[in-house]
Image: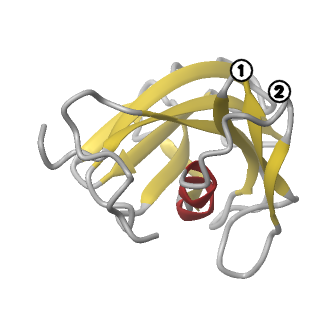
Amino acid sequence: MDNILGLLKLRIKKGISLAIRDTRSSDPYVVVTSGDQKVKTRVIKNNRNPQWDDELTLSVKDVNTPIHLAVFDQDTFSVDDKMGDAEIDIKPYLQCLKMNLGNLPNGSVVKKIQPDGKNYLSEESSCILKNGKVTQEMTLALRNVECGHVVVEIEWKEVPGCKGLSGIEI
């Protein structure tokens, strides 16, 4: 536990215009990996615009370890088909956390992150203060696929007895 900085809660909200991998649709699910950790959402049958709203949690040991997100189509009799992937850059979000802005009004936008060639954002993303916690919702454009986006919200959880972010340079 002493090498964990904290926990990152990911709410995999939905997919938008995901690729067709079966006859007319797909049975998508999302796999999130970071280092040796791997978590996944449930499968939504026959849906190119699935609403998962699944909460997944990763322990963060190093802010530089990439968080990789991949979408797959579940197949019964063959290997699941890839439907694109993206990476989540948590550094802008962690910079917002380190500002300690808990005294701002609920709903305050702490920081706006613009899409650029270094991230997978398909539109502007904001770090927002909600009920005393900073969250970031992002729409990620999937790569290595003809179409598709995934909407994700992230939130940091401090863990008693862990290092936390205080001494970390981001």
In the image shown, does 80 or 147 lie closer to the viewer? 147
**Count of numbered tags:** 2
In the image shown, does 146 or 95 lie closer to the viewer? 95
- Secondary structure of the residue carrying tag 2 is loop
Q: Is residue 138 visible?
A: yes
Sequence-wise first label, 1 or 2 = 2
Q: Is residue 60 above or below residue 167?
A: above
Quadrant of the rendered structure where residue 71 is? top right
**Residue 54 relative to residue 57: left or right:** right
In the image shown, does 130 or 145 lie closer to the viewer? 130
Amino acid tagged 2: Asn
Q: Residue at x 67, y 42 (%)?
A: 21
Q: Which residue is tagged 1?
A: 131
Give me the C-alpha separation between circle 1 and circle 2: 6 Å
**Residue 97 relative to residue 138: left or right:** left
**Residue 108 relative to residue 118: left or right:** right
Q: Which mark is drawn over residue 142?
A: none
Q: Residue at x 85, y 45 (%)?
A: 109
Give neighbour class at mark 2: few <14, some 14-19, many 20+ (Cα, 10 Å). Answer: some
- Secondary structure of the residue carrying tag 1 is loop
Instruction: Name the outermost residue toward the front.
Output: 103
Q: Point out residue 18 in the picture as x, y percentages from the top left corner.
A: 76, 43
Q: Point out residue 118 in the picture as x, y percentages from the top left corner.
A: 65, 79
Q: Is residue 19 visible?
A: no
Q: Residue at x 62, y 62 (%)?
A: 92
In the image shown, does 98 or 59 lie closer to the viewer? 98
Label 1 with label 2: CB-CB less than 8 Å: yes
Quadrant of the rendered structure where residue 15 is? top right
Image quadrant occupied by the N terminus: top left
Q: Which residue is tagged 2?
A: 106
